[in-house]
Image (tube, rainbow, N blue to C red):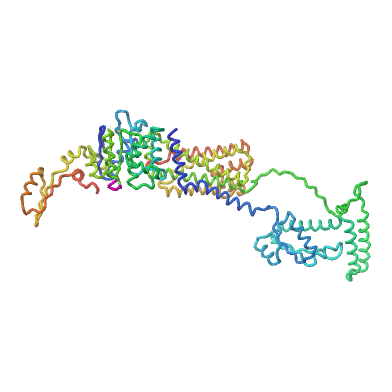
């Protein structure tokens, strides 16, 4: 990591966007207290470093790999990790029930996890991370390798958590996810934070101009412009036009402009 | 403490649900103990009797009577066969020897002091001289008994003397001078039998009184309980070996499970919980220790209830099992650092385990090891585990004698666990 510094507000979804190897997971491991930074510090809510057990108790972590026990049921996984977080008795039961209901796995709670689909395992992975009702959630590519239906379910879960006041650090290399979910996005590459802002600001600052593409039977014109509406209106009166498209800049374009390469290179 | 117990319970639950792991932890050691115990126990009969084939080629009343004596003899396990089959069974090592009562055996038995004696053909491998000598001695014993029985009854002596004299008188091969000597001797014997005095003055003459006159030596047997220095049955040394195989299975299984946790990311999740690293390892070690104890007690229960293994000291047995479980829990921790993947960990771990078992008495019982191998076995924790368990079962260890293997095992556990915990790679 190289000079990484950012803050996450209460009830905010903060995205870390970058290709594989950018340092997203390493950042999460440091935020979780598993790795220690060479220099600098990480502080949660002014109560201290995640090196301390009582601070880690306020953090929930959904690792990129499916960190679950396949030979235990979904409920047993929840109960086990809940106990490690210090829950017991009625509180543990309530939280287990709530989390399983939250991710839509209540009916499959007594099935062994190895019989779950990939999407269900992903959702359980998320549920386990919030069994102790943490203030900060560290979600490391929580939709990796899941079907669109489960992905949408996870998106809804994440938004719901935000609405409940939870702070979320969300890593992804899918720009669509970052654009859809994140209040602010930090773009990372090679251990450095290249840019940090809301998605519209990132796009306007680093995405370049919009492109208006007009298509005639014998030719195609591409015009870069700061005012795509004006250009659009100019072309649309031409009766020989057979196609007209406006491409606004995206995070993909932002990343390309910042690093000189595409996000998934 | 709650976290440690939670990890321990979780690992034991996973062990029970993993069919292959459960089999190799509990049933495989049991099968080893029973299988080798049965083999070393032989066919279920006393190993102190000699297996022989018996062929009666005379087929007379006398030969049949003698064959019956041999069949009842405790020294022999007799199988009645024909000559060809008897030879084949001895040649292939299925029987130690064959005995053939040759034609004329019955007639020869009736004669006393003259003519050829009853003849028995003994077939035995020349290398088995000790058994051959034993068989000849046993044959002489029962032949002598017949002779004694024949003289136990004066009326029977009188009848036999009459029959012998009749044959001698009509014999054309015995010279006249010898016939006269036999007439005198047998006549005197007949008279002696009828008027034999008691051995002790004043005692009446008993019908059996002549028997002792023809007894070359009187042996008085006194039973003296010998202090046993070996196992009373084969299961007393195969079950300790089985337990050690179970310990090795637990060691490998839990060691590999740590590697699996690291690879699958559950270890990372455990580390993100509000607990220290040592608590994670303590939870895993507790599960391994509990599994070793459960496996040991299951095997011992079967050994005691089904195979009549009778431990010399139950308290020392518990002490040795606790020490062994502790040692192998420590070894488990070191196993977890041997491989980066489950495959390499399992390969290296079992290779180490096999060496421990080979030199430590897991394959060859300690008490049959040659001296040099017994010296080498000191390097293996398997040896100390087996020695401790055997010490409590059949070696008759005192508490002081038990301290040595137990202390060594506890030392091994501490050193191996500390080294493993130090070298363990937490990151994938």
Residue located at (33% from left, 31% from top): A49
Q: Is residue B173 left or right of residue B84?
A: right
Quadrant of res A249: top left
- Say if B214 sits above or below A233 in the image: below
Residue extending farthest to the front is: A107
Residue range corresponding to the magenta coloring: A145-149
Residue B47 visible to an observer of this rendering: yes
- Say if B344 sits above or below B119 in the image: above
Residue B428 visible to an observer of this rendering: no
Task: Find residue A245 and report its horizontal and vertical position in percent.
Answer: 13, 49
| Magenta stretch: includes residue B194 | no
Q: Is residue A106 left or right of residue A152?
A: right
| Magenta stretch: includes residue A146 | yes
Residue located at (35% from left, 44% from top): A66
Task: Find residue A203 and report its horizontal and vertical position in percent.
Answer: 17, 41
Residue extending farthest to the top is: A46
Task: Find residue B278 and report its horizontal and vertical position in percent.
Answer: 43, 35
Q: Is residue B28 left or right of residue A15?
A: right
Residue located at (94% from left, 65% from top): B180
Quadrant of res A79: top left
- Say if B87 sits above or below A202 in the image: below
The one of B244 and B72 positioned closer to us in this rendering: B72
Quadrant of res B186: bottom right
- Look at the magenta stretch and give its main secondary structure: loop
Q: Which corner quadrant holds the N terminus of chain A?
A: top left
Task: Find residue A114 and report its horizontal and vertical position in percent.
Answer: 39, 47
């Amino acid at each position: 990591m190289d000079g990484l510094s950012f803050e996450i507000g209460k009830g905010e979804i903060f995205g870390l966007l970058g290709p594989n190897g950018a340092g997203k997971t390493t950042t999460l491991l440091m935020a979780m207290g598993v790795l220690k930074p060479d220099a600098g510090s990480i502080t949660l809510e002014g109560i201290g470093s995640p090196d301390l057990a009582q601070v880690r108790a306020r953090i929930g972590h959904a690792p990129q790999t499916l960190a679950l026990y396949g030979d235990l049921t979904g409920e047993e996984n929840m109960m086990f990790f809940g106990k490690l977080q210090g829950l017991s008795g009625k509180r543990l039961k309530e939280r287990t029930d709530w989390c399983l209901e939250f991710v839509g796995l209540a009916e499959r709670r007594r099935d062994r996890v190895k019989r779950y689909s990939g999407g269900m395992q992903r959702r359980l992975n998320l549920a386990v991370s919030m069994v102790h009702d943490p203030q900060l959630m560290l979600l490391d590519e929580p939709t990796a390798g899941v079907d669109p239906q489960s992905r949408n379910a996870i998106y809804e879960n994440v938004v719901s958590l935000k609405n409940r006041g939870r702070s979320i650090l969300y890593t992804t290399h899918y720009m669509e996810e970052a654009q859809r979910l994140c209040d602010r996005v930090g773009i990372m590459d090679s251990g450095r934070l290249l840019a940090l802002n809301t998605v519209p600001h990132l796009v306007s600052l680093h995405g370049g101009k919009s492109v208006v593409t007009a298509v005639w039977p014998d030719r195609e014109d591409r015009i870069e412009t700061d005012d795509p509406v004006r250009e659009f209106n100019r072309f649309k009166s031409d009766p020989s036009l057979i196609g007209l498209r406006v491409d606004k800049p995206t995070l993909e374009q932002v990343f390309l402009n910042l690093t000189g390469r595409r996000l998934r290179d | 403490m709650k976290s440690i117990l939670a990890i321990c319970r979780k690992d034991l639950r996973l062990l029970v649900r993993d069919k292959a792991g459960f089999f190799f932890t509990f049933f495989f050691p049991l099968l080893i103990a029973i299988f080798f115990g049965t083999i070393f126990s032989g066919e279920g009969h006393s190993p102190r009797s000699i297996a022989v084939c018996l062929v009666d080629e005379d087929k007379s009343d006398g030969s049949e009577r003698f064959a019956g004596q041999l069949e009842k003899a405790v020294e022999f396990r007799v199988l009645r066969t024909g000559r060809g089959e008897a030879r084949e069974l001895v040649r292939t090592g299925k029987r130690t020897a064959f005995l053939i009562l040759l034609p004329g055996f019955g007639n020869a038995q009736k004669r006393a002091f003259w003519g050829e004696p009853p003849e028995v053909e003994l077939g035995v491998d020349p290398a088995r001289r000790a058994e051959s000598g034993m068989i000849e001695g046993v044959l002489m014993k029962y032949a002598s008994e017949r002779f004694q029985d024949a003289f136990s009854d004066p009326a029977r002596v009188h009848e036999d003397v009459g029959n012998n004299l009749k044959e001698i008188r009509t014999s054309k091969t015995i010279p006249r001078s010898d016939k006269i000597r036999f007439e005198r001797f047998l006549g005197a014997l007949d008279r002696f039998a009828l008027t034999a005095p008691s051995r002790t003055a004043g005692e009446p003459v008993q019908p059996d009184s002549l028997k002792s006159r023809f007894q070359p030596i009187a042996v008085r047997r006194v039973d003296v309980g010998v202090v046993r220095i070996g196992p009373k049955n084969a299961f007393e040394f195969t079950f300790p070996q089985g337990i050690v195989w179970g310990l090795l299975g637990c060691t490998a299984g839990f060691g590999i499970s740590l590697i699996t946790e690291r690879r699958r990311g559950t270890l990372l999740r455990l580390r993100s919980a509000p607990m220290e690293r040592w608590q994670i390892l303590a939870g895993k070690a507790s599960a391994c220790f509990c599994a070793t104890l459960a496996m040991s007690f299951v095997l011992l229960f079967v050994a005691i209830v089904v195979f009549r293994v009778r431990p010399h000291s139950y308290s020392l047995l518990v002490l040795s099992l606790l020490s062994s479980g502790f040692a192998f829990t420590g070894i488990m921790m070191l196993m977890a650092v041997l491989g980066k993947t489950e495959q390499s960990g399992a390969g290296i771990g079992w290779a180490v385990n096999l060496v421990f078992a080979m030199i430590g008495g897991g394959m060859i019982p300690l008490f049959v090891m040659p001296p040099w191998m017994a010296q080498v076995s000191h390097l293996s924790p398997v040896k100390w585990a087996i020695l401790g368990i055997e010490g409590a079962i059949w070696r008759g260890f005192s508490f002081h004698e038990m301290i040595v293997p137990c202390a060594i095992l506890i030392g091994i556990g501490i050193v191996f666990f500390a080294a493993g915990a130090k070298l363990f790679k937490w990151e994938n």
